Image (cartoon, rainbow, N blue to C red):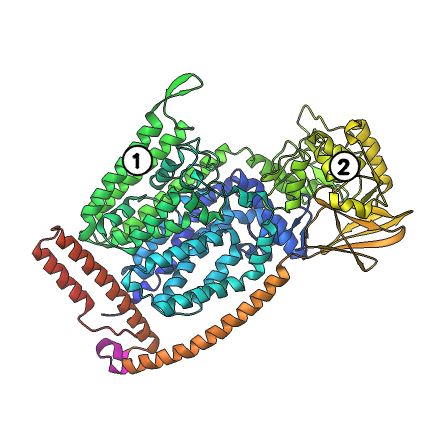
Amino acid sequence: MTLQTQDKSKHRQAFFIALAIGIVVFLPFVIQDGGYFTYYGDFNVQQIPFYQLAHRAVRSGDVWWNWYTDLGANFLGSYSFYLLFSPFFWITLIFPNSWLPFLMAPLLVLKTATASFTAYFYLERFVRDKNYAVIGALLYAFSGWMDYNIFFNHFHEVAVFFPLLLLGVEKLVTENKRGFFAVTVLVNAVVNYWFFVGETVFVVIYVLVRMSDAAFGMNGRKFARLAWEAVLGAGCAAVVLLPSAMAIMGNPRTASSELLTGWNFWVYWHEQRQPAIVQSLFFPPDLPARTNFFPDHGAQWASLSGWLPLFGMTGVLAYFFANKDAWLKRMLAVCLLCALIPGLNSLFILLNHSYYARWFYMPILLMSLATIHALEQSALTTRYFRRALRWSAVAVGFYAVMCGLTPNFQEDELRFGMEAYPLMFWATVGIAVACLLLTAFLILWLRPKPHFRLCTTVGISLVSALFLLFYLGNGRYVSDSRELVLDTAIPGAQYITLPREPFARTDVYDESDNLAMFWGLPNIQAFHSIVPPSIMEFYPAVGVTRDVGSRPQREYYALRPLLSVRWLFIRADKEEQSPMPGYRKYSEMAGFYVYENENYIPMGFGYTRYVTRTQLEELPVEQRSHVMLRAVVLEDDAVERHQDLLRHLVTPEGMEFDENTVGRDSANRRVQAADSFQKNNDGFISHTSFAEETLLFFSVPIDEGWTATLDGAAVDIERANIGFMAVRVPAGEHELRFVYRTPGLKKGGVISLVSLGLLLLYLLVSLRAQKRDNEKLRQRRAQFQGAATHLSWSEYLELLQDRQRRRANLQRTLNQASSVRSRGALSPEEHTLLLDAVDEEDGGEPLENG
């Protein structure tokens, strides 16, 4: 046996083929968009402005409190989920901020190619011919899950680094390579803490199932070492994990009261959900927000797709049929079970009660492995591929008939088909059928031929590119925000000439989300899932829905002066401008009429009266923001601390509240406004000169990270108006300074430093142990005869490892052959020929176990 040096460059093939496919797919759209790449939905209104905002913040050092995310937010806590610790984001820091919209497509191409690259290194361990690892890497990188999540392009990072996590497990257990697994745990935890929870669950299941394979070689010592490195890696990531976890505590979307219980744990609430999960394995994905095959099961943004380009489930089924007892078969079966049971599915998504299939990239990697396993096995599995093709054809035909031809009443009219978008539905069915036919041609006609692997690679590349062109084109076609992003959102900032002092927020209603974020303006209209819990508490208390976005309607016009909103943007081409009461036209900018709020109150103002939280909750929600302009809302336990300054507004329920009272109350608050308010990279500074002691209110969300000093001396921060901050300020001239530091960052940093020290110590100890192992190998090498004697030490180690892997593969082949022989599927002559081929391949030389 000789070293297969020609296989060493295959990882480059995996990268550059995926890179070329990505360029072919995205270049036409980039040319069409004039250098940009726009898509639709969340990609346009979140991904692009988030990149620009974070880029500006990091480059300017403004990394503590972000004033441009909703009413203000913990920067690290709000953006660690989206992009902050992605290496692909950090690449952008070398470019000017104005280049960010131009970089979205190149980043997507690079992430896809890198996902193929990392997947290759995991997959190549399980195949003898590295060309199949390239095929599997492309299946993973261009899977339906990856196509779907261009919509949420920050999900691609987790798919890039996840294969390294499983590779770390394999290296530690099978090769005794210490430290690599700990580093991969660190990387995955830092890149995205939310997905890391699901990855942790998956790795635990993976190890337990993998242990059922005797060739894995797990023992008590290796298991303990695996657990130890997992703890070390997570500990090193604590500087990110702890602040991120603290940032989402109190967020209603993570409330424990919403956990799945009772029948909801075992059965999905909608009968369409489970057939939709199975359907997603055989067909290309629906567009996000446009579920088609099963339009009513409420998974519009669930990332539901398990499709592999070209092969679909055919390769996986062939592997299942050909392998009676294999760890990979058991692992995929467990994954399917978890997908079909709501409570088990929720384990991968931080126990979220909402339905998400965002963990499917993990079994997709193993599905790719099963497919290339089936492809690599020669005549032994040809019959199983025929069987798999029949079953895949049955599944595709069944879903096509069920979803596309079933009689169905809609709006009292009988029609055939239950799909939501018939044209897209039949196009998707056509793609699935075409892939089946192409797969049948490859397997039944080209598989015995020497150029089969090349044809398969070309087939996957063509299917991936053509489908993705179709898929992205359809998404762009249904977009209602592309023109706005290209013509207004991206270039609009250069036309905005509003005064930046004093600090004021903007309002852009009835427009695309996060438009003011594109322009770098503080704003109250925000589409962002991770904001301070105090914002989540405040808005519902005043009648405004706050789930994934803050979108206060115009009838809540009293909120605007309370939140220091000065500017209102309404598109100039709208016939009905309908600004809220108290606004006058100021100017025209970037295609918008700009209105100024005459009731604007500068940030930082005082009160003379108060109401209790209990009183407020007894009022109709539409009156509550009006009351907050007249009296500060204090928690019941805070009343005693401040009743020496404030008079009690006893009967607000009998008072008048309308646009005239908003003007009067706003004027009264302006009289008690601070002299200045200046935000900075640490927080903000306010100067005051009140005639008497005042409770000064700031519409800045209260958060654990805030501290305040008055003339250098620490002062207490009071919760006011449900979710904001207030402090007592004495009469006379004073400087009030608020400083924000990310909660948990310091403690997380200490844990990370300690863990990093332990990891380095562990690696040093492991290095000494490795030297002892190497000495034993040297002694064995001296006894090794034949081809190994002329090799270098590194070549010898590579030879030995390659022979060990080949021995394991050959043993699996023998086991399969014996299983097939026992069922009478092979004749005695065929069985003997197979055993002779195995012996010849093995070379008849004993392998060392070192």
First in residue order: circle 1 vs circle 2: 1
Give, as a three-letter code, the residue at label 2.
Answer: Met
Q: Is residue 652 above or below residue 606?
A: above
The stretch of residues the image draws in magenta is 782-790
Quadrant where the N terminus is found in the figure: bottom left
Residue 410 visible in the shown view: yes
Task: Tell me the quarter of the image containing the C terminus.
Answer: bottom left
Callout 1, which amino acid?
Answer: Val
Q: Residue 744, which numbered label? A: none
| Mark 2 residue element | helix
Residue at 26% x, 50% y is 319
Drawn side of residue 314 relative to residue 685, left or right: left
Image coordinates of residue 26 in percent, x first then y, are: 46, 44
Residue 60 locus on image (x, y percent): 68, 56
Task: Where is residue 421? Give x, y as percent.
Answer: 42, 28
Q: Check disc 1: other Cα within 10 Å, few if <14, some if 14-19, many if 20+.
A: many
How many numbered marks are there? 2
Number of the label disc, if any, that sits on residue 396? 1
Above or below, comparing residue 652 to residue 45 in the picture: above
Residue 614 left/right relative to 227: right
Whether residue 587 is visible:
no
For image coordinates 27% across by 46% down, the residue present is 317
Residue named by callout 2: 628
Q: Is residue 429 magenta?
A: no
In the foreground, 409 or 676: 409
Most frequent secondary structure within the magenta stretch:
helix
Q: CA distance from mark 1 to mark 2?
A: 59 Å
Q: Residues within 10 Å of mark 2 (few under 14, many from 20)?
A: many
